[in-house]
Amino acid sequence: MTSPADADRTQPTFFEAVGGEPTFRRLVAEFYAGIAADPLLRPMYPEEDLGPATERMTLFLMQYWGGPNTYSAQRGHPRLRMRHAPFRIGPAERDAWLRNMRRAVDTLDLPPDLDTTLWDYLERAAYFMVNVMEDPAVH
Ligand code: HEM
């Protein structure tokens, strides 16, 4: 006899479905390789070494999608909008972030349904992080 709990365990998490930790490591390494070369976004990152920021983003995304909770064990509750408050994130920064992330997601070559699930989240999260509604040039 199988119980509903057994059935649940046969459903992989999104984290597992996309290939687990190695996939998230590849995604975020690609993303930060783009950030390193981005003239608008690179100056926003306070640290010279992007390694620690790469690790934080990797652990956050792994946790969000059902992987280990290492991010919160190290950093506490994500509170991402609050953590982004020190940075000026307008439409231009959001769009540059999404451009880098789209390129990184493309390198994973995920099945379309998984790609769409991941991208819908990242796009919504990027719009949510905007904390300056207008670009200065508009005024
Ligand atoms: C919309 C444009 C965005 C910009 C310009 C931006 C910029 C930044 C910057 C400058 C940092 C500080 C680097 C660090 O210390 O880690 C940071 C941290 C972080 N960002 Fe973003 N970000 C954006 C959107 C997002 C989105 C959509 C997510 C999640 C899906 C995200 C997740 C994170 C995480 C997890 C951290 C580390 C938080 C911590 O534990 O301190 N960011 N971001």
Image (cartoon, rainbow, N blue to C red):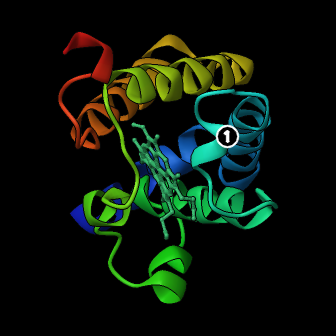
**Is residue 42 found left or right of 6 in the rendered image?**
right
Rendered view: 132 above or below 65: above
**Is residue 107 found left or right of 4 in the rendered image?**
right
Q: Residues within 10 Å of mark 1 (few under 14, many from 20)?
A: some
Residue at 55 percent of width and 17 percent of height: 99
Residue at 43 percent of width and 19 percent of height: 95
Q: Which residue is mark 1?
A: 42
Count the labels in the image.
1
Rendered view: 35 above or below 46: above
What's the residue type where badge 1 is placed? Arg
Question: In this orientation, which residue lies closer to the viewer: 36 or 80?
Answer: 36
Q: Quadrant of residue 132?
A: top left
The residue furthest front is: 139
Residue at 76 percent of width and 34 percent of height: 30
Q: Quadrant of residue 7?
A: bottom left
The percent position of residue 1, horizontal first and vertical second, equals: 31, 65
**Is residue 4 found left or right of 63 in the rendered image?**
left
The percent position of residue 43, horizontal first and vertical second, equals: 65, 44
Rendered view: 40 above or below 111: below
- Tell me the quarter of the image containing the C terminus: top left
Rendered view: 75 above or below 51: below
Q: Quick one: SS at disc 1? A: helix
The percent position of residue 46, horizontal first and vertical second, equals: 63, 61
Mark 1 within 8 Å of ligand 1, using the beta carbon: no
Question: In this orientation, which residue lies closer to the viewer: 123 or 95?
Answer: 95
Residue at 30 percent of width and 39 percent of height: 125
Q: Quadrant of residue 91?
A: top left
